[in-house]
Each structure stands twice: as structure tokens, then as C-alpha cells.
Amino acid sequence: CAEEIKKHFSLIGPRVIGKTSLNIARRDATLAVVNVGSCDELLDAVQRHHDIGVTFWVGVNPCRVELDSFATHADIIEWNNTLIDIDPIRAKGTDATAEQVKKARQVAEYLITSLQARGCQKPPVIFSGNGFHVYLVRPSVPITDENRAQCIEDTAILFHAVVTKEISEKARALDCKIDSTFDLRRIAKLPGT
């Protein structure tokens, strides 16, 4: 568990400034939002709040330090990642079967092959529990009020440049979906928890 969290934090942790938001939730309610600035702080927070039925979600881009609820676009202060979330299509509230996970992996591999064919480095991929998160890691861009709208627009442009019609069709053919929530304030389930 700790190794998976450390690997994930190396992707989503602040590189320059800010904190990473850790959202702790039960099925229908957010219990707490904790801001962490280091992997040790993240591990401590998970240990302190670990409970059966609790799910941990982390922001994929750093936020301002004093955040006490889910981040808005105005809270994100650094753009490091765009997340591509690939999941098998299944009944709500059910876990993916081994066969469904295999199909989601095929979509992730197809996406990675497509990126590499276009000259990109192989992106980090993390198993999300039911599917896969492909991280488009970029040089850090500090976000200010002056460039926030452009960063939001650029995130959408990047997502649509990567998730082409061909890749979307491949996902559908394998009974998978690519989540269209790709914005700066995106949260993702913390692997290993």
C-alpha cells in the first residue's frame, strides 16, 4: 500500500508550490479534506483516517494550501498533469471482472502506443481498482488569475488531441469508456487504499 501511494504521490505531488488535496469520503458524504505537502504527510493522513468503507481521492494537480473542501478551478495553483481515466463499462456499483480489467488494459496500451507513435514518452499508468489512469505529465505551469482560463482551455485541447476518435472507438469496441472529466481540478482514487 505505501509503495503504491509513494509512486502515485511522485506524479501528483506539488513540484514547486502548494499542496495536494486528499478527500476522504464515504459513499454519500465527504468526511474530510486534508492538504498534504509531502509523501510522508499523505501516508500519515491515510493512516489516521483509514477506516472500513472510506475511500481516498487525491487531486491530480496541486492546490492552494488553505483548501478545506473540494477544489474549484480557482484553487488549483499548478498544472502538472492531465489524467486519462479508462474504465470498463459495467453495472453501477459493481467491481470490474478480470476480463473487463484486461480489456481496459488493452485500451490503455493502445493509447500509449498511439502517443509513442506521435513521438511522446511512455506516460505513467496506474491501476485504479477497476481500470487504468494514464497520466499526461507535463512541465509544471504555475497558474495565476491571469493565465487560469488559458490553462483550462489548454487542458481540454490536450485531452482531445490525445483521445482521438480512433482511440474512443477502440475503447467502445472493447466495452470500455474514457472518462471525459479531465480538468485541472480532477480528483482520482488513491491507489493502494
Image (cartoon, rainbow, N blue to C red):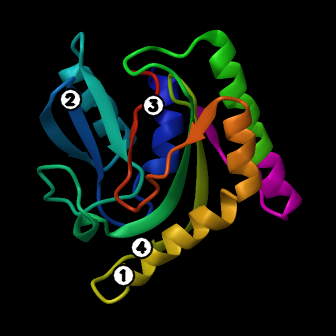
Q: Nearer the viewer, residue 160 or 126?
A: 160
Q: Looking at the picture, how far across and down is residue 191, in whole percent? A: 46, 28
Task: Bin the neighbour count of mark 3 within 10 Å (Cα to Cα): few under 14, some 14-19, many 20 and up.
Answer: some
Name which residue lies at 64% across and 20% down. 101
Q: Determine the image quadrant of residue 88.
A: top right
For the residues bearing labels 4 and 1, Cβ distance under 8 angstroms: yes
Provide the residue designation for mark 3: 5
Q: Are marks 1 and 3 in contact (CB under 8 Å)?
A: no
Where's residue 14, x and y in %?
A: 40, 57
Label 4 to label 1, Cα distance in Å? 5 Å
Q: Nearer the viewer, residue 37 or 188?
A: 188
Q: Position of residue 80 (x, y in %)?
A: 49, 63
Of the two numbered discs 1 and 2 on the same chain, state the one appearing first in sequence: 2
Q: Which residue is mark 4?
A: 152
> Gap in Å between the C-alphas at discs 1 and 2?
29 Å
Residue type, label 1 = Ala
> Tag 3 or tag 1, which sits nearer the N-term?
3
Q: Is residue 73 magenta?
A: no
Label 2's element? strand
Residue drawn at x 23%, y 70% is 74
Q: Report if residue 116 lies within the magenta region.
A: yes
Q: In this orientation, which residue lies closer to the viewer: 140 or 164? A: 164
- The tag earlier along the polypeptide, 4 or 3, is 3
Residue furthest toward the bottom? 146
Question: Which span of residues is magenta-colored?
Answer: 112-126
Q: Amino acid at mark 2?
A: Ala
| Callout 3 amino acid | Ile
Q: Earlier in the sequence, mark 4 or mark 2?
A: 2
* Marker disc for residue 149: 1
- Cα separation between marks 4 and 2: 26 Å
SS class of the residue under badge 1? helix
